[in-house]
Amino acid sequence: MRKTRRHGLILSIICLPFSLMIALHASPAVLGKVLISPNEIEKYSNLSTSVAHIKVHTINANENGSPLGVDSNRVIVINFDDSYKNQFTNAKPILDRYGFKATFFEVCDWINSKSEDDEMMTWKDIAELYKQGHDIEAHTMTHPHLDKLSSSELEYEIGQSKRCLLDHGINSTIFAYPYGEGWDNPEVVNIVSKYFDLARTNRDTPLTFLNCGDTMGGYAPDQPSCSTYPDNDILVGRYAINSWSHRHIEGDYSTADQRCEGACTYYNNSQMFEKFVEVVNSQDKYNTNGSMVAIPIVVYHTIVSDHDLTNSKRPVDITVNLFEEEMRYLHDNGFKVLLMSDLINDSI
């Protein structure tokens, strides 16, 4: 049994017609729970009344209401996607060195496998991560483009990924969309909502804004509200938690062919470190006067042994020495590292 943590974030969504608190590490949910239909999602996304809020929550707070153990100007969530073995062999020892815990989103059918280029984690590796207090969450069965699947295929990829982890003693309550796709698709979100309490995507900004209804106009004017589907093409809230994917190649790059098919930008280690520092500190202009308004979520994939990223042709690679430098920066600058399971949904 894992210990309940002292801190967390509450994601309050008043657009839904029920009240629910999801406790950390609760017992496995019933897979066939009542589903939220796309029509219901749109029905409760009226711009005049529907606003999503995220608040800071802890069991114990100081007299002024601020959370114990959390520096609101220095908070980050670290994620790893896709079950690569080098996350366990290369990244975990560095996390251990600095006392950090991370959230690992697993692709179930990739576990215990090996390809010409990559070896994946074993279930033994995942059990060890879970035992040591890391988060283990769901990232589908085979990592497909969810927007291209039928309803039955979506049920398999999403629902079975929940069942797969349950079969290994892990109750995943959070889902990550492969390629960041599907968060704005009512059919996909509808099925995700049957099995999971939260879902993570990635978009242009690295920040997930807190107290959304009070801050969006000032901090994200291009986003008209915190509602679900206000214009049928924007979703924010618990099924579209934002993140920043650590990528050293951007643009029209074909990962399969390992070549640029248009305009591409390439970054070396020094440049990527500068981007990382900019991303994690982008919260500072919002988190002032003891308040928490925004939090960055950084997503890693493959941690390779090359000395510099210029030797890598895979956009999501990060070198061991660069990962070490980034973790040292977080440690030396007093960042509080949270888990995705520290996000708690409280619909009121």
Image: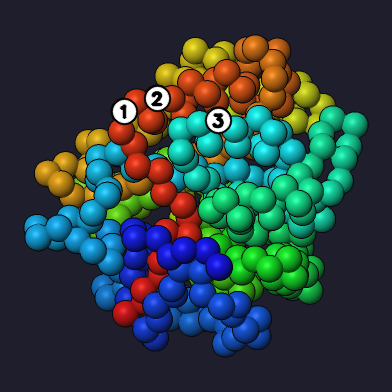
Query: Which x, y percent locates residue 142?
Result: 79, 55
Q: Which residue is mark 2?
A: 329
**23 to the left or right of 163:** left
What residue is drawn where x is 52% and y is 23%? Answer: 324
Tell me if mark 1 has few (under 14), some (14-19) or many (20+) residues whose alpha carbon lies within 10 angstroms of its own.
Answer: few
Q: Amino acid at mark 2?
A: Tyr
Q: Earlier in the sequence, mark 1 or mark 3?
A: 3
Q: Which residue is mark 1?
A: 333
**30 to the left or right of 270:** right
One can see residue 128 in this view: yes
Q: Amino acid at mark 1?
A: Asn
Image marks 2 and 1: residues in contact by CB distance under 8 Å: yes
Q: Residue furthest right?
A: 116
Screen quadrant of the C terminus: bottom left
Q: Which residue is mark 3?
A: 94
What residue is drawn where x is 57% and y is 18%? Answer: 321
